[in-house]
Image (spheres, grey):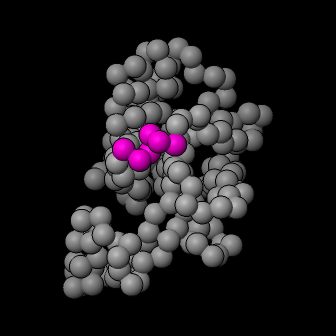
Amino acid sequence: MGRLHDLIADALAAELLARTEWDEPPALCFLYVEAGRPRISALLLPDEMWSADRPPAVLARFAAISTSNSSLLASVAPEGLHGAAFRCEAWEIDAGKPGTARRSEAMADCMAHRIERRSDAKEIRSIYAVDRAGITYAAVQRRGEDDVRRSIAYPGAGSGFSGTIPRALDQIVTAVLGVAMPGRKG
């Protein structure tokens, strides 16, 4: 991992630790790097926007709109813009090992969006970011805990992030910065 990448992961963790309340609306943010220091700044979007659907689905629609306006967005990208981030609250579970009944049940609950009903579900707040190089960052904090788990996934490393949120952030970064992002699985 590079020093800048560690600093970005640290900035994401600090963003979560700075939150003093729970049950907050999601936030779409931009990631800036100025004089070698990362900074996260939330876009001023109406909180009501996030109630239209599950937050990742709303983010995906926003990304699709961004893609259709990419030339305009890229022309007004501020100096130091390095990537995009998405903060939200969610639920996590220990899904168990692949090929087990526990894993199959957990995956079915994930696909049906009913994780929060499980007795083993833990509430989390998370922030994911994608930078102009396609590097994906995550920071996750469980409710009631001070510890923040951080992770960084490099393109082509084989163990990256997948899903709606990273794909939407890829689209936003491409639209705003005009850079081609590496393909993502899933």
Main secondary-structure element of the magenta-colored stretch: helix
The answer to whether one can see residue 131 in this image is: no
Residue found at x 30% / y 51%: 185
Looking at this view, is 159 or 65 the one in front? 65
Determine whether, in the image, residue 186 is placed left or right of residue 73.
Answer: left
Q: What's drawn in magenta, residue-wise?
A: 47-52
Q: In the rendering, at what x and y percent does residue 105 appear? A: 24, 79
Question: Where is residue 61, by image quadrant?
Answer: top left
Q: In the rendering, at what x and y percent does residue 176 appear? A: 49, 26
Determine whether, in the image, residue 71 is placed left or right of residue 34.
Answer: left
Residue 13, above or below 167: below
Furthest toward the right, the residue is 35
Residue found at x 57% / y 40%: 29
Q: In the rendering, at what x and y percent does residue 62 appear? A: 40, 34
Determine whether, in the image, residue 133 is placed left or right of residue 58.
Answer: right
Q: In the rendering, at what x and y percent does residue 164 appear? A: 35, 49
Residue found at x 43% / y 15%: 71
